[in-house]
Image (cartoon, grey):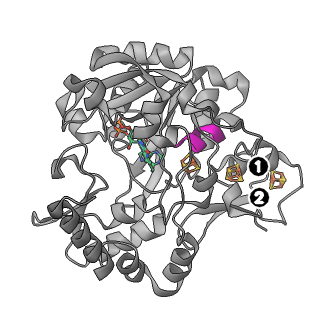
Amino acid sequence: MMLVKEKSRCCGCTACKAVCPHDAIVMRRDVLGFPYPEILEDRCTQCGLCEKVCDFVKAHEPAPSAEEVTLSVYAARNKDNAALAESQSGGAFTALSDVVLSGSGAIYGAAMNDDFTVSHTRAVTAAERDRLRGSKYVQSDMGEVFRQVRKDLSEGREVMFTGTPCQNAGLASYIPERLKEGLVLVDFICHGVPSPAVWEDYVAYMGRKGSIDKVCFRDKTSGGWKVHNETFRYSGGKTLTRETFKVLFYKNIMLRHSCAVCPYHLGERKADITIADFWGIGEVMPEMDGDAGTSMVICHTEKGKALLDEAREKLNMIHVKLSGDFISRKNPNLFRPSRIYKDREIFEKEYAEKGFRHVARKWGDMGWRYKAWQLKVLIRRLTGRR
Ligand SMILES: Cc1cc2nc3c(=O)[nH]c(=O)nc-3n(C[C@H](O)[C@H](O)[C@H](O)COP(=O)(O)OP(=O)(O)OC[C@H]3O[C@@H](n4cnc5c(N)ncnc54)[C@H](O)[C@@H]3O)c2cc1C
Ligand code: SF4
Ligand code: SF4
Ligand code: SF4
């Protein structure tokens, strides 16, 4: 029996699975690869803990009006150029995690596995942490990570957890108050998580062109921080740059259902710190703009501020006050969920029936529709029409 009746009422955080004293919950993937909790009825004692722990369905406040908010934020860039090159934005994550690692703490975040799937994992060395760098634009498999975090905290280890706002909210709800002192939560502004199954099919499709050594969801070396392309590096040295997954991602056609009704806007975040791409930096601080990447860092708690203070020596950092209106124009998901594409249901159905290449041709960049659209944009640009 599924724990939730409606898919949009579950973000897949795994708090219910972790809290169940009888291991009566397993996460089952749907056709797009998104995990949902299923109750093994022969083990369930109806204790109700799984429903109680679920933060996603609790009552949430409406989002604050962007026009009425002024935000204190930091523009941050890691001083270590090698770390910056491997990071998605300005390398704020590396600087923050360096502080926790130096105190023998543990870092949790999303890593790419050898088969290019994405899972949350634990890191206690810089080399292990480096695998967590970079955005992987699919929902990560949480496995047993919530229980591992709790074990670390129970043993007195400091923990920095990084992930989507909903993963952070789920963890915050699962970890008992008495253990929270050693836990620092870091989330990001979240556009939504795309389908793991579509990603896996795409990698398999690109794998027909040779043996893939490395994949990057958004490679800074293919045009800089602001350009979003996937790269596939093959053994033998060949690199292919594509945008099929990016096109489907930004069309909002393969996001998890819960992302359409995400309650984790600015006012409902459970994290101590939010990190993000500092879109629009050139308009407020041209000196911090550039292809290398710049992070936006927002501290929500004293604990978050204290961690950022300790990370300061590794970062070039400038403080600025910005209107909510400015941030909402550049990075709207701090205030509201993404609007889902009208064909979301048809996409899922046709993906299940006809597979990856069909949907990539119909809605991605692989078919004539996309090429016709590109031609239209080009003609408009050349003729000066908008
Ligand atoms: C699905 C997704 C949607 C995003 N949407 C936006 C957005 O709308 N606006 C915006 O400004 N930024 C967004 N980001 C965040 C942004 O891409 C950068 O990850 C962020 O700015 C941190 O950059 P960095 O250089 O400090 O860290 P990096 O060194 O690049 O570290 C990346 C961090 O992200 C975590 N992470 C990576 N992939 C995942 C994943 N699949 N699930 C959970 N955690 C993950 C890692 O654990 C690590 O902590 C999104 C990221 C993801 C994964
Ligand atoms: S706790 Fe998380 S995984 Fe479980 S039902 Fe709620 S949102 Fe879904
Ligand atoms: S009701 Fe209790 S025993 Fe049953 S699945 Fe939920 S947490 Fe587990
Ligand atoms: S948009 Fe909301 S529900 Fe979707 S992954 Fe991000 S935080 Fe979770």
Q: Residue at x 31, y 17 (%)?
A: 318
Specify the segment rendered in magenta: 163-170
**Residue 299 to residue 63: above or below:** above
The quadrant of the rendering that contains the N terminus is bottom right
20 and 2: which one is in front? 2
> Is residue 184 at least partly visible in the picture?
no
Residue 63 in the image: state x and y as whole percent: 63, 36
The response on whether ligand 3 sits within 8 Å of label 1 is yes
> Is residue 365 at least partly visible in the picture?
yes
The response on whether ligand 3 sits within 8 Å of label 2 is yes
Which residue is label 1 attached to? 20
Residue 239 in the image: state x and y as whole percent: 15, 63
**In the rendered structure, does residue 309 fall within the stretch colored magenta?**
no
Q: Amino acid at mark 1?
A: Cys
Q: Residues within 10 Å of mark 1 (few under 14, many from 20)?
A: some
Q: Residue furthest bottom?
A: 354
**C-beta proximity under 8 Å, tags 2 and 1:** yes
Whether residue 315 sits left or right of residue 161 in the image: it is left
Q: How far apart in space, not on screen, are marks 2 and 1 (Cα)?
A: 6 Å
Magenta region, main secondary structure: helix
**Residue 270 to residue 16: above or below:** above
Q: Residue furthest right?
A: 46
Q: Amino acid at mark 2?
A: Ala
Q: Residue at x 55, y 51 (%)?
A: 142
**Label 1 element class:** loop
Residue 21 in the image: state x and y as whole percent: 78, 47
115 and 252: which one is in front? 252
Which residue is label 2 attached to? 24
Q: Residue at x 64, y 43 (%)?
A: 263
Query: Mark on residue 156?
Result: none
**In the rendered structure, does residue 167 fall within the stretch colored magenta?**
yes
Q: Residues within 10 Å of mark 2 (few under 14, many from 20)?
A: many
